[in-house]
Every structure is written in C-alpha cells, then in structure tokens.
Image (cartoon, helix red, strand yellow):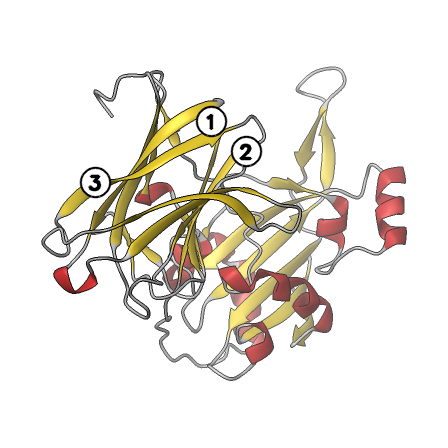
C-alpha cells in the first residue's frame, strides 16, 4: 500500500462561538443524524485498544485484547456541518465551535450472512465521546479542544473538560488539528491500466496548520510553511515513474521549490528525493506542468512528496492541481 504525502504550512481562520452548554451537547448527541453530518459511510470496526480508551494502551491491555476477541467495537463519526470539511480532511484546522461526536456500538454476530456469521454493529450505542473546539487560548496544549463523554442513552454527560486521557492521545496528532482521523474514509490516488497514476487535489487528505482543498477552484492552496501536507493512499506497481506537478504560480513566487521525497531510514528521515523549481505560470488559475524527475518504487514503498518554501521563505509558493506519474516505457497519451 502506497502512502504519498505533500508537505508545507498555513494559518487557520476561525469564527467566534459561545461554548455549548451540557444540554446543548446532549441535544446534539440525541439529534446527531439530523443536526450533524456523518463522516463515516458505515460503522467502522475499531481495534479493542482504540475503542476502549482515548489513550495509548498499557501492556496489560494489549495482552488482554489478544486474549479476548470481544473487545473490538464499531464506531460512527459525526461532525458539525460548519466543520465538516476539516473533519473530512479537506482542511487542516477546524473552525471554532466545531462539534465532533463519536458513537461506540457493540459488536454482534450476524448469522443472516452465513452459518459462521459475520461481525456487525449493534444498534444500541454503548457510549459517546466528543470534542468541542473552544475559543483561542482555552487549551493551547491540545488545539483549544474540550473533550467530553456521554452515556449510551444520551441522558447525561459523564465527563467534560481538558480530560487528561483524551489529551494524552490526541497530542500525537498535532499535524491534523489534534484529531486522529481514524474514522475518516480513505481517499486515494487514481491508477489507470496503462500505468498512469493521478494524485488529484480533490482526493488529498491535508495535514498541518493551514493548507486546504478549495472546492471552487479544485486546488490545494494556502500553503504557508514546511509543516503542511497533503496525502493520498493507494497501490502502485513496482517500477520507475516519471513525475510531473501541475501548479499555478505568480511571478513574485517564481523559483519556489517543489521537493518530492520517498524511501526513509529507521527514524523516518527521507533518504531519496527529487525536486524542481516552479516558474511563473501567469498567476492563480493558470496551470502548467513541471517535471520533477523520476520515482522508483519497491513493493513496500511509502513515499512522501514534500513541497518546501525554502527558496522563497514565508511565501505561499503555489496552487497545486494534481501530481501525475507514469511508468517509464508506458505511453503518456491520455494521462
């Protein structure tokens, strides 16, 4: 499985919002199907250690999970509609006031499938956990998020605040506004039969502090630093690929460097990379493709494509429409 990532950075814009009262949170939980948008397309089976607690598992819990096949749970994930783009991974920072709710469902054995049955989600929630994006400065150590838990019948809030267990887990995900995205449906690269591979902006999952997918322009935009990233998942056949990056760039940003990395050492540092400097394309909306050289993938490759602003420090260098790759020896026609 290939994981491709584009990196850079940016600032978020959030609107002010009053913190929700307990009653308002409970109403949102009870009416989640109508007042929120579901991010998951169906219940997702979560590992026992993930479904039990929002924190890293202890050695004993890992041992218990291996010995007990019934710890796994199904989950559904809902988001306030104003924060849906960020919850889906199209934006890097959730707006202030965003409400995220995770519904935990029991595992049942569905005998209607076959005689051995198949794991399926029960209909009665066991628990709800949630996150509320508070005002700037509320919780700087964890992206200003407030955490809460709600009973399975949505009758009462069982805990709320800067919950230590939740923060211990979510602080690992600072590059995605402290949300794990484990329940967000994967989006991927598009591979054609002739070996051509397209990584369109619309299929990217963004990371960092500002980069976002602009639906109206169909581009990745608002890059502002090295920490931003865009990622695609998918399978790529082993081989050598020529790489092109389709971008729009203004004259003042010409010379911005697009660096593509792949193959890493044991500490995750890139050991192979290619790059190109982007020329003036005539400004935003005027896209041209630039060759970035070639990638060579092995079966277990996990490449990272990194866009760096080092040649133009502090300047958002480009809008990215897509990245294209095609196997050497295969026709470029129709790419």
The residue that mark 2 highlights is 301
Earlier sequence position, callout 1 versus callout 3:
1
Q: Secondary structure at mark 2?
A: loop
Farthest residue, direction left: 282
Image coords of residue 322 (percent x, y): 29, 41
Of residues 293 and 183, which is closer to you in this image?
A: 293
Q: Which mark is residue 236?
A: 1
Of residues 118 and 313, which is closer to you in this image?
A: 313
| Residue that appears at 45% across and 67% down | 98
Q: Residues within 10 Å of mark 3 (few under 14, many from 20)?
A: some
Vertical relation: 54 (above or below) 21: above
Image quarter of the N terminus: top right
Disc 3 versus disc 2: distance between alpha carbons? Answer: 25 Å
Vertical relation: 330 (above or below) 283: above
Q: Which mark is residue 94?
A: none
Vertical relation: 271 (above or below) 114: below
| Residue that appears at 49% across and 29% down | 297
Q: Which mark is residue 289?
A: 3
Q: Secondary structure at mark 3?
A: strand
Can residue 303 be seen by looking at this rendering? yes
The label nearer to you, 1 versus 3, is 3
The reply to whether dot 2 and dot 1 touch (C-beta < 8 Å) is yes
Is 238 on the left-hand or right-hand side of 124? left
The label nearer to you, 2 versus 1, is 2
Where, by quadrant of the figure, is residue 92 drawn?
bottom left
């Amino acid at each position: 499985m290939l994981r491709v990532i584009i990196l850079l950075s940016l600032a978020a814009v959030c609107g002010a919002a009053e913190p929700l009262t307990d009653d308002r949170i409970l109403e949102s939980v009870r009416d989640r199907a109508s007042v929120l948008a579901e991010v998951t397309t169906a219940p997702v089976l979560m590992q026992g250690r993930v479904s039990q607690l929002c924190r890293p598992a202890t050695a004993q819990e890992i041992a218990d999970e291996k010995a007990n096949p019934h710890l796994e749970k199904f989950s559904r994930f809902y988001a306030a509609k104003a924060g849906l783009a960020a919850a889906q991974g199209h934006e890097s920072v959730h707006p202030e006031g965003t409400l995220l709710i995770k519904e935990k469902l029991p595992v049942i054995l569905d005998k209607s499938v076959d005689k051995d049955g198949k794991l399926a989600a029960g209909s009665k929630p066991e628990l709800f956990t949630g996150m509320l994006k508070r005002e700037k400065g509320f919780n700087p150590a964890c992206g200003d998020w407030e955490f809460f838990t709600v009973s399975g019948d949505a009758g009462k809030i069982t805990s709320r605040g800067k919950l230590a267990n939740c923060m211990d887990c979510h602080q690992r995900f600072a590059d995605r506004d402290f949300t794990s995205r484990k329940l967000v449906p994967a989006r991927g690269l598009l591979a054609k039969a002739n070996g051509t591979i397209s990584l369109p902006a619309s299929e990217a999952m963004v990371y960092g502090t500002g980069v976002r997918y602009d639906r109206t322009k169909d581009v990745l935009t608002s890059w502002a630093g090295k920490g931003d990233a865009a990622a695609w998942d998918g399978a790529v056949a082993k081989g050598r690929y020529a790489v092109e990056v389709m971008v729009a760039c203004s004259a003042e940003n010409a010379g911005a460097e697009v660096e593509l990395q792949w193959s890493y050492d044991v500490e995750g540092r890139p050991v192979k990379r290619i790059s190109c400097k982007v020329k003036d394309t005539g400004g935003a909306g005027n896209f041209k493709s630039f060759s970035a050289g070639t990638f060579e993938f092995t079966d277990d490759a996990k490449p990272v494509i990194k866009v760096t602003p080092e040649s133009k420090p502090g300047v958002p260098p480009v809008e990215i429409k897509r990245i294209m790759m095609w196997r050497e020896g295969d026709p470029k026609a129709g790419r």
